[in-house]
C-alpha cells in the first residue's frame, strides 16, 4: 500500500448560509475527495428584544488538519453585528487569524502542504 499525502490532502468545500428572522447562520463543510465529511466550521448569530439581547455560537473541527474560527460581537443600540473569519488547512501548516482594529476586519493567513481555505464576513441582526 502506498500513501500519497497530496491526494490525501485534497478536499471539497461547500458553504451554506441560512437567514431566518432574528437569526443568521452559516457553515463550511469540508469533505474528503470521495465525498464524506472531513470537517465543519459553523457560526450563528441570534438577537431579540427590546431590550436588545445578542448571542452567538461558533465551532471548527477537522480530521487530519486544523480548522479555526474567530468571532467578534459588536452590540449597538438597535442591532447586533457578528464579524467572523474562518480557515482550515490539511495536513500540516499554520493558521493565523487576528482582529485588526484599524480596518475593523480580521487578518487571515493560512499555509499548508495540502489544501487550504478561508473566508470572512459580517452578520447583522436587528429585532
Image (spheres, grey):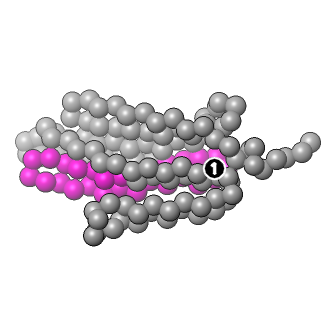
Query: Left or right of 5: which side holds 103?
Result: left
Q: Write down the region rendered in magenta.
A: 60-84
Residue visible at 29% across and 37% down in the picture = 24
Residue visible at 54% across and 49% down in the picture = 117
Pick out the residue farthest to the front.
103
Residue visible at 60% across and 37% down in the picture = 12
Disc 1 secondary structure class: loop
Residue visible at 15% across and 41% down in the picture = 126
Q: Quadrant of residue 19?
A: top left
Q: Looking at this view, is 76 or 50 the one in front?
A: 76
The magenta stretch spans residue 68: yes
Residue 43 location in percent, x, y? 38, 44
Q: Is residue 8 above or below residue 102?
A: above
Query: Left or right of 31: which side holds 84?
Result: left
The magenta stretch spans residue 3: no
Residue 40 location in percent, x, y? 52, 41
Residue 55 location in percent, x, y? 26, 46
Q: Looking at this view, is 14 or 77 the one in front?
A: 14
Total number of numbered labels?
Answer: 1
Residue 21 location in percent, x, y? 21, 30
Mark 1 crowd level (few <14, some 14–19, many ≥20, 10 Å Cα):
many
Magenta span: helix, strand or loop, mainly? strand
Quarter of the image with the N terminus is top right
Mark 1 lies on residue: 115
Quarter of the image with the C terminus is top left
Pick out the residue farthest to the right.
1
Amino acid at each position: 500500500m502506498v500513501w500519497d499525502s497530496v491526494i490525501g490532502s485534497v478536499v471539497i468545500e461547500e458553504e451554506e448560509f441560512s437567514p431566518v428572522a432574528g437569526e443568521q447562520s452559516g457553515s463550511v463543510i469540508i469533505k474528503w475527495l470521495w465525498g464524506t465529511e472531513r470537517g465543519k466550521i459553523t457560526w450563528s448569530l441570534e438577537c431579540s428584544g427590546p431590550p436588545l439581547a445578542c448571542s452567538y455560537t461558533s465551532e471548527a473541527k477537522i480530521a487530519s488538519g486544523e480548522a479555526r474560527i474567530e468571532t467578534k460581537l459588536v452590540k449597538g443600540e438597535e442591532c447586533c453585528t457578528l464579524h467572523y473569519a474562518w480557515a482550515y488547512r490539511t495536513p500540516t501548516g499554520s493558521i493565523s487569524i487576528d482582529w485588526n482594529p484599524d480596518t475593523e476586519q480580521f487578518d487571515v493567513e493560512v499555509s499548508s502542504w495540502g489544501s487550504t481555505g478561508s473566508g470572512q464576513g459580517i452578520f447583522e441582526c436587528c429585532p
